[in-house]
Image: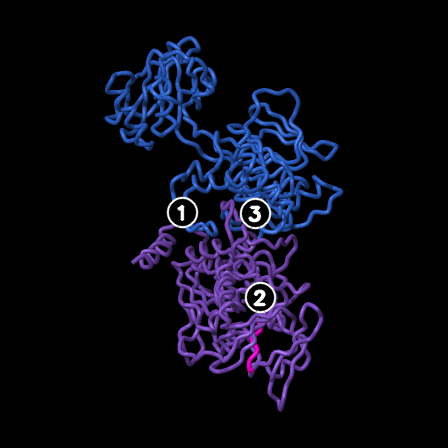
Chain colours: A purple, B blue
Amino acid sequence: MIHTPAARQGPIETDAVIVGAGPVGLFQVFQLGLLEINAHVIDSLPHPGGQCAELYPDKPIYDIPALPLCTGRELTDRLLKQIEPFGATFHLGQEVTEVRKLEDGRFHVMTSSGLRFLTRTIFIAAGVGAFQPKQLRIEGLDKFLGRQFFYSADSAGDVTGKHIVIYGGGDAALECAINLLGASNTTVDAHAGKPASVVLIHRRDVFQAEPALVATLKALCDARAMQFTVGQITGYEESGGILTGVEVTVPDGTLRRVPLDMLLVFLGLSPKLGPIADWGLALERKQLTVDTETFSTSMPGIFAVGDINTYPGKKKLILCGFHECVLAAFGAAPLVFPDKKIQLQYTTTSPRLHKLLLESVHLHNQ
Amino acid sequence: MIHTPAARQGPIETDAVIVGAGPVGLFQVFQLGLLEINAHVIDSLPHPGGQCAELYPDKPIYDIPALPLCTGRELTDRLLKQIEPFGATFHLGQEVTEVRKLEDGRFHVMTSSGLRFLTRTIFIAAGVGAFQPKQLRIEGLDKFLGRQFFYSADSAGDVTGKHIVIYGGGDAALECAINLLGASNTTVDAHAGKPASVVLIHRRDVFQAEPALVATLKALCDARAMQFTVGQITGYEESGGILTGVEVTVPDGTLRRVPLDMLLVFLGLSPKLGPIADWGLALERKQLTVDTETFSTSMPGIFAVGDINTYPGKKKLILCGFHECVLAAFGAAPLVFPDKKIQLQYTTTSPRLHKLLLESVHLHNQ
């Protein structure tokens, strides 16, 4: 997989941008690849796989044809292997924020990280929408967002000498606490100094996290390297425009004050249609309406595949999304190659497809 | 897999008959099974897998989603495993010869073996049509068909003491010769006596057959248990209404007479739309037209999935057929369960589907 190069000036010119790196977005890479259309893939999550990888990585799926049983993680891995020959570029951890049609028929696409694209076609494979952190809704608290209050450890900056409160009970919350204390080999920033204190707050004393993380957390608490408090954050305290603490309601109903310099919140992710709703495409109950011949949306050049689209008979199944990718790819081909006659060829018999599929595989195997 | 029970009187009553046991027909079993609709599957070939198993069992397919590479044989095996929980009944080696709509809305279906069904729904997954033996076209020879001239060893009857000529150079021809001589462990009928002689005729001295079969054949010829002749059958001889021999044109252009009591011809299989063309369904260039909401043909209750159907945007890919199976199953459900509201459930989360998928698997594992 090729990731975004570090920094660049002008927009990236391409034939196709795929919005969403779930199973259907990944298979769209494959179907475009067979037609020799290279794609850039954008996803709000930091890894490919979408819902499958985020919500049920280890749960079995039984209805992918010819895979009697596979997990979300396995499905993602298999698709990544399948699309390897086509060398798509992935731009992860960012959302598409703007899509604008240009006079020459191309689209200008911008992401939340400031990346820009000029593309002939767009494939929306955004499933239930972009995954975003579930918010901690306490009136007035948002004014500290990005300064002392964060939904991601990466964006929090230097923690050296600070009193940190982490709120949540999943993998992300526990990983953050463990990383901040330098108790893991996978510390995000090995150069950062240690915080003055770390307090983890979670509404229950049961964690929805990997057993290894829970064991490490317990060991850290036992060694008094950090503290754990059961309770819900129900308020905050400030002084002179600075967040100074949170108010925690503990299980017996009493309130407790926990002082802090920085609040890191990990309440899980929930999907949101997000900016796609504002692109001016025809919607029906928050789904993009498409025609079943090409899976084009109401705007020529923008296609929608997978759970985000709707049409008569639509069933929200991954395997249906796969079919939609085929017809969308053929729908897009005349826009990318206006002068070429595009014909269906079979991977079993076509020398052209063998060359595409196998020469690159050989490259990858080197 | 459950096969046709030996003999039965009345028609088999069922909710669904699937015509075609190729990959799409097999996946139709799965999608109907999830909706608790049991199916009977009919195919002209003696084994499931259709074109995949017949034409390219060992060739790689690269475009089945999440299966970066698999052969036709492997695809078939995987699908058979996946549909195991649903215990479909297979009726192989026979074609559907007649479909008639009854007054109560059901269909009467009859096969070339005389099996009869009363069914609420029919799913045509017949691909490029029913595979039928390629014919040996020699004027006048057909009058011996079914008496001394056969396209299948099974239908030939007793060979004891007879002079047999086998024509062809593929697996089927070689297997037939080897079986007739009792040189294989998989003799079709162990009780049958041996023929007086066996002559294999093939247009070349190279066989398109498994190396093990070719080796056995050579050993049998070396041991003079049988003979092999290179040439093409170009005529025949008869006496008193009895076929007495064939005329073979050998490579140098001369004619040779080979006497016989029975002629068995194996020139391979070719697909034919066959009787489906006469069922009164709307066709477009020999394809059944369907609506893309339910994949219903022009006759309510008859659905068409896979390569045999056509609609705007249609691509003849196995993976598209899989999608069509889903919508066809949901299209059929109201006909089978007129009083039930059918909702899509997910195999990952539905306890009902887990029960269906897993309890039967346990049964099979016993």
> Are the numbered discs 3 and 1 placed on the same chain, yes or no?
no
Amino acid at circle 1: Thr
The residue most toward the bottom is: A240
Amino acid at circle 2: Gly
The residue most toward the front is: A223
Please determine whether, in this image, residue B353 is positioned above or below residue A323: above
Q: Which residues are magenta?
A: A261-265
Please give the residue where the numbered disc 1 appears in the rendered image: A348
Q: Secondary structure at mark 2?
A: loop
Give the Cα distance between marks 2 and 3: 52 Å
Q: What crowding class fits label 2: few (fewer than 14 Cα within 10 Å), some (14-19), or many (20 or more)? A: many
Chain letter of mark 2 equals A
Please determine whether, in this image, residue A77 is positioned above or below residue B25: below
Q: Secondary structure at mark 1?
A: loop
Residue in the foreground of this view, choosing between A278 and A179 = A179
Residue A109 shows in this picture: no
Amino acid at circle 3: Thr
Which of pointers 2 and 1 lies earlier in the amino acid sequence?
2
Please give the residue where the numbered disc 2 appears in the rendered image: A169
Residue A229: name its quadrant. bottom right
Q: Secondary structure at mark 3?
A: strand
| Residue B310: mark | 3
Residue in the picture at 24% in, 17% down? B223
Circle 3 or circle 1, nearest the eye:
1
Q: Is residue A263 highlighted in magenta?
A: yes
Residue A324: name its quadrant. bottom right
Q: Are the two marked residues, 2 and 3, in contact with CB atoms closer than 8 angstroms?
A: no
